[in-house]
Amino acid sequence: MEHDKNEKGRVLVAMSGGVDSSVAALLLKQAGFEAIGISLQVWDYRQHGGCLSRASCCAPTDFQDARKVAASLNIPYYLFDFENIFHEKVILPFVRDYQNGRTPNPCIDCNQYVKFGELRNRAEAFGAPVVATGHYARIEKRADGFHLLRGIDDSKDQSYFLYALTQTELGQTLFPVGTYSKAQVREIAREHGLGTSEKPESQDICFVSGSVGEFLHRQGASQRVGRIVTHDGIELGEHDGIHNFTVGQRKGLGVGGSSEPLYVIALDPVDNRVIVGPRSQLERSTFEVDRVNWCGLFVPDAPFECMVQVRYRHRGVRARVTRLKNATLLVEYIEAWSPVSPGQAAVFYDLANLEVLGGGRILRDNEAAATAGGSVESHWD
Amino acid sequence: MNKQMINLDANASHSPLPEVLQAVRGWDGSSLNPSSVHAYGQRSRAIVEQARDSLAALLGLKRHETIVFTSGATEANNAALWQVVLRDGPGLAMATTAIEHPSVLETANQLAHFGVETTVISPQALETDQWQECLSDQTALFSVMLANNETGQILPVPGIVRKARSRSPNSLVHCDAVQAIGKVEVSFEDLDADFMTVSGHKIGALPGIGALITREERLLKPFLRGGAQESGFRAGTENVLGILSLGIAAQVMDASLDDRRLKMEAYRQCLWEGLHKAVDGIELNWDGPSRLPNTLNVHIPGVIADDLVIALDLDGVAVSSGPACSAGKPEPSHVLLALGVAPERVRESVRISLEASYPEGAIEKAAACIVSCIHRLRVVNRGKRT
């Protein structure tokens, strides 16, 4: 019953069929791990549009690709059904957030509960002390603990989505491709004939094909017609559901007749209004953040300065962070400002803009006061 | 394959017999079309007919029965059920049991598009005295398996067939004997069926070969068209290597059936004892007196079967939970559900099905491995599963 036990032990590698996770598996095997490839089916592709819809992940061909790569690496491969937990922890909150005027980032919830939560459960079940994914990020083990860093390829860095990992989780996770550039990863795949080297990137949200609005509608988000107004209450038009809008959005507002371009400044789920205005009204000097996670090494007890990144494609700007009551944070821009979309993550990096200190969820203005002590889940700070 | 594995999933597929491997490897590479006039054809023809004789001997066939070689048991089951539409029968109705293999149940579903109404009889109903009342003189076909692949249950087919025939004298009777052959004595005559299905890779032949046995030629209408092979009953160039392997497997089964049966029972007993004494709460899902010597379908509280199958695979032991599904996620066993096993329990049930020959000490080692994986999974699952 003994098989080749590699000296580094077992690692469960989440494989999507794409080039990043394929190369991650290869690198682990080369490094002497007993790599076990798994795919997480989070979405029943057949039940949501079948062959015609092409969501960018979870198609049967993606699993076939992952399976082929695993076979060519001579590692075991298993497919897991995580649909229920994905639905509960990612899809439902996604729909709810949009209905509440937030722009959610489902990748963060998915990482937290599905990729790292459930994956880790399975890893324990199968005697694997670590898990690995194809994320572009780095974890460095130093004397004082585990440090989560940006991937070396700036254009691909995905550390933004990983701020919710704790020290324990960081200690049990590997990101093999974080020290490579995307071009290098493709080259490695090509060299080893992995077959997925030229596969196009999956863009956007993995479970949405077509527009988010259509998706939400199919999920039963109600189309509540409401008013589009300026910040001083002048009505400019109608909308068919605030979930169709994101703060900072400029296109598709359907209102004209203004001398300067109009942006969505805020979404009001209570009165079902979309508030629009010129870009200058997006400007802000502060915003608030809840559901904070610190990666474990640095937990602030006094106001401090850092870099804050407020969306995936954002370089990060300098800010001062102060802890408020209710465990929310007040973030004050120091120099440059950037518009924020409530529901998105604000991730804090050190002043070198390299290491993730932690992050949280951006709140609507006045939301922190309104939801004092609310029903926030316990694993958040 | 680098990994050393032990096959405790024989009901899914039995390892090819050494005699089969030897014969297949001994193929000299000449072309194999038994319909050709030339020497290649003659040689191939001889192989096919010899295999046919071997299979006939195993199943106790007399002269008038016909063996039709097929691409496997699935094709044979399809061909049998399609007789409802292909022949001029009493009507477009058929009946079968809820615990049949999907190649029977799915074919019945498909036949609905052609107007065939299928009555599916629950295993509980089969145990009553009046189940046959669901049959009528319009019933064109009745299909019942001899042994179930998931639980190992052997059905009292001769008695079932007798009741069926007395109620529907004009109905054809089909028996899927796939799991019984090679484990227990199977006599086609005793079953009193019109058709019987045989599978090659369940008895150590190559996958991709099976047979449909028919009591009389005149009862069978061809399913696959386009050639005169198999006496016009099944078009397509014969899979000579597959047929060769099936013939050899049949010979081996015929010569050693009792010995195999005793060994399988001994292994099963050893395995069950090892599990039962070390695993709290482990239970057999089906424990009737009439059963295959090699099958254990067990419920293991506190362990998700899909996880156990994987954990065991990683440690070199092959078992299964529910039918394999190439499309992705496995579906729960329709057989266990039909038997009234609660879905939560089905989710925690695995099937262990043994071959007749393992290396010294291998079964004991496998038992220890299963126990250790179960214990580890129980620790992990406590309080963690959603």
Image: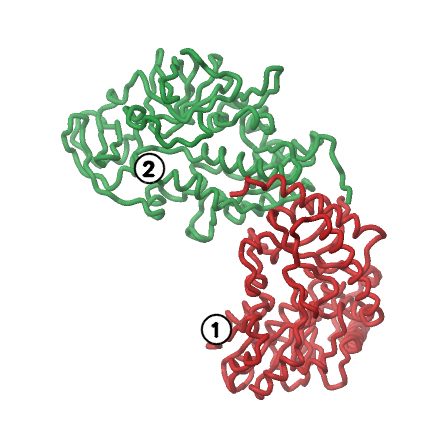
Query: Is the residue B195 above or below the residue B364 in the image?
Result: below
SS at circle 2: helix
Palette colour of chain B: red
Report whether A141 appears left or right of B64. left
Q: Quadrant of the N terminus of chain A?
A: top right
Query: Is the residue A66 above or below the residue B360 in the image?
Result: above
The x, y position of residue B220, in whole percent, is 63, 82
> Residue placed at 68% from the left, 65% from the top?
B152
Image depth: mark 1 or mark 2 in front:
2
The x, y position of residue A168, in whole percent, is 57, 26
Report whether A102 appears left or right of B380. left
What's the amino acid at mark 2? Tyr
The x, y position of residue B363, in whole percent, is 79, 52
Report whether B329 appears left or right of A109. right
SS at circle 1: helix
Q: Residues within 10 Å of mark 1 (few under 14, many from 20)?
A: few
Point out which mark residue B112 bears. 1
Point out which mark residue A98 bears. 2
Q: Residues within 10 Å of mark 2 (few under 14, many from 20)?
A: many
